Image: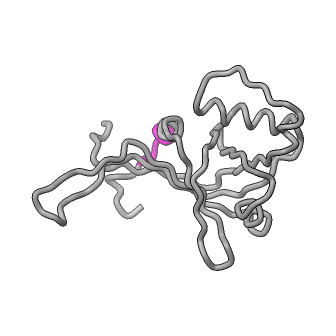
Amino acid sequence: MRRADKEIADRGEIDKILRKATVCRLGLVDGTIPYIVPLSFGYEGNTLYFHSAREGKKVDLLKRNAVVCFEFDVDAEPVRSEASCGWTMRYRSVIGSGTASFVEDPGGKSAALKIIMGQYTAGPYEFSEEMLRKIAVIKVAIREISGKVSGFPRKG
């Protein structure tokens, strides 16, 4: 990272950002063009989970190229300045990359959906067999991850 003073190297701090985030922006490859989609998500260990319709552009792109990148940000707000070019942003963010795969078995889908739901609300959660058949669940094994902070006091 070019600005080492803004780098978050502590994985615990990165995890706090992921737990606080409500949206993941998932970057996919569409030939030579990037394609970014905002998604609800779940996070556990070194894995991200997403749910989706079984058909659509995102699914088609992932079947052709499973390499993805992702971005999360929290606490974002503009910081005003008297000078027009002096404005900046306060934020905490996480970016990374990984490899996507589809979870096919109903037990794995159910477990992943519980992780996704746990990002937003307390359980218990139940999913019908019909619902599990109708949706796609995407699992991203995180390969690289880093955090960045701007405009907030740094710890020790």
Q: Which residues are magenta?
A: 8-14
Q: Residue at x 41, y 51 (%)?
A: 148
Q: Nearer the viewer, residue 71 or 113?
A: 113
Q: Nearer the viewer, residue 79 or 48?
A: 79
Whether residue 94 is in magenta: the answer is no
Residue 4 occupies quadrant = bottom left
Residue 152 occupies quadrant = top left
Q: Residue at x 60, y 62 (%)?
A: 27
Q: Position of residue 52 (x, y in %)?
A: 73, 49
The vertical placement of 128 against 134, above or below, is above
Q: Nearer the viewer, residue 70 or 61?
A: 61
Residue 110 occupies quadrant = top right
Q: Residue furthest left?
A: 82
Q: Nearer the viewer, residue 116 or 130?
A: 130
Q: Residue furthest top?
A: 124
Image quarter where the C terminus lies is: top left
Q: Residue at x 58, y 62 (%)?
A: 36
